Amino acid sequence: MSEFIETKGLKKIYHVGGQKVEALQGIDLEIARGDFVVFMGHSGSGKTTLVSTIGGLTRPTEGTVLIEGNDIWKLNDKQLSHFRNRKIGFMFQSFSLLPTLNVLNNVVMPAIFSANSGKKDSDTLKSKAISLLTDLDMKRKVNSFPSELSGGEQRRVAIARALINDPEIILADEPTGDLDIRTEREVIDIFCHINNAYQKTLIIVSHSLTWLEKAKTIIVMKDGLIFKDLADPVEAIMDGVCKP
């Protein structure tokens, strides 16, 4: 793995009701290409803010985010939008699947709005979507609608959609948030498959300790700070005691 993503002095300050909230307190972080990183910690620790800043969705108050040496927050809005569309696949707990579209069209949609979509005809995009869905054991559901799918199946569709533009980075915020343990393990295994078979860099936000079994890198967050290489990450997460 080689150096890929780097943050330097990353800070994010919110002003809420006259109070200053330091969501990120000067984060220095390196993520290697092909890593499988899981950010863990209690609500309010800064996990989602950090990942959203890395993904070009939340502008930092201070600091830089470098991806392949490029400072993404020096890009203008149009350039940043293009960068996100080309480089990053997003997956959120709410899925955001469109209820009026079937599985196939939900997966294809991000590619239609891609800057490169003009180079690909509809049949090519649908063929790629079906290939992804087949790999995720969802080929039999291509004509189904979101309301006809289980929670685990909806997540598989969301994963295929995140992969359709062939991004190098997948950002997922609580992708197994409300699943039973069996389905959660199935979804985590899918992420492992994506990391290994597709060579994607995975950055996951989760409260679930189940991810500890499969992630390559565990980063615990507390009060806007990160803690890596902990002797006992479970203790740090459960008790809030972060000891190197």
Image: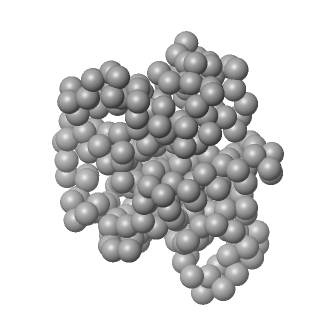
Q: Quadrant of the C terminus?
A: bottom right
| Residue 230 appearing in the image | yes
Query: Residue farthest to the top?
Result: 100
Q: Looking at the picture, how far across and down is residue 201, in whole percent?
A: 43, 60
Q: Is 142 above or below relative to 192?
A: above
Q: Is 151 above or below relative to 174?
A: above
Q: Residue at x 70, y 50 (%)?
A: 186
Q: Looking at the picture, how far across and down is residue 6, in whole percent?
A: 34, 68
Q: Quadrant of residue 7?
A: bottom left
Q: Residue at x 21, y 26 (%)?
A: 118
Q: Residue at x 62, y 63 (%)?
A: 40
Q: Quadrant of residue 99?
A: top right
Q: Nearer the viewer, residue 202 or 38?
A: 202
| Residue 19 appearing in the image | no
Q: Looking at the picture, how far across and down is residue 219, in whole percent?
A: 56, 70
Q: Is 144 above or below relative to 172?
A: above
Q: Looking at the picture, how far across and down is residue 125, in whole percent?
A: 36, 29
Q: Nearer the viewer, residue 61 or 160?
A: 160
